[in-house]
Amino acid sequence: MGYDVKIQRLALNAMIDLQGDAEAIKNWIKDDDLPEFPNKPNTSITNQQFKIYWVGIEHWLMRSEIELEDHLLEMTNPSAAPIEISVVQVSDAFKFFEVSGPDAAEIISIASPIDHHLTAFPENGVSFTNIFGIKGLLIRVNNGFEIAVESSYADLMADFLQKANA
């Protein structure tokens, strides 16, 4: 039968893992292209080039198209970051999937125990959660969700998502 969804593996993205005091990170990364950091946990801020996800206590992820990876590395300069913050390139660590369409929430209900209703998981919601028993990042996007998992689990996640839509 299946659901009215489109499930696809997304292209590689540039990603930087940021940990430490938000003000120290903001002072380190000075770039006019960068959006403000989210002001609420488990939310994201997006502009035309970058996405910033607040994923934990003093923990953020910055994401952009892979073509902007050099710019992202210049902005964050991981190798020279001050001792009070952690700046790590993690582009190769994650693989992303998109689940979109009218029934996208049905697939997420099968995949994860997280309450993804808009009152609990807003339009800019983002959170690490259990997805088919695998630690994953769930991101609400227009018309659906994105899921990021460690690269080594990408084929398994693709298989689980297809089976959930069977």
Image (tube, helix red, strand yellow):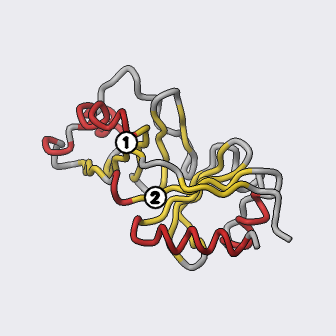
Q: In which quarter of the image is the C terminus?
A: bottom right
Determine whether the residue tagged by mark 1 lies in a helix, strand or loop. helix
Q: Which residue lies furthest to the left in this view?
A: 80
**Kind of residue at disc 1:** Ala
Corner quadrant of residue 66: top left
Residue in the image at 65% along x and 50% along y:
140
- For the residue pair 158 and 76, the one nearer the viewer reads as 158
**Is residue 138 depicted above or below 124 in this figure?**
below
Q: Pinpoint residue 109: horizontal percent, then vertical percent.
A: 74, 69
**Is residue 114 depicted above or below 127 in this figure?**
below
Q: Quadrant of the N terminus?
A: bottom right
Residue in the image at 70% along x and 65% along y:
108
Q: Residue 95 carries which label?
A: 2
Tell whether 104 sits left or right of 114: right
- For the residue pair 160 and 131, the one nearer the viewer reads as 160
Tell whether 162 sits left or right of 35: right
Q: Pinpoint residue 3: horizontal percent, then vertical percent.
A: 82, 63
**Is residue 41 depicted above or below 105 in this figure?**
above
Q: Residue furthest top?
A: 32
The residue identified by callout 1 is 22
**Kind of residue at disc 2:** Lys
Q: Pinpoint residue 42: horizontal percent, then vertical percent.
A: 56, 52
Determine whether the residue tagged by mark 2 lies in a helix, strand or loop. strand
Within 10 Å of disc 1 (Cα), the crowding (few <14, some 14-19, many 20+) is: some
Residue in the image at 34% along x and 34% along y:
26
Residue in the image at 27% along x and 34% along y:
70
- For the residue pair 77 and 166, the one nearer the viewer reads as 166
Within 10 Å of disc 2 (Cα), the crowding (few <14, some 14-19, many 20+) is: many
Marks 1 and 2: which is nearer the front? 2
Q: Residue 153 carries which label?
A: none
Say which label, 1 or 2, has the lower sequence index: 1
Q: Pinpoint residue 4: horizontal percent, then vertical percent.
A: 82, 57
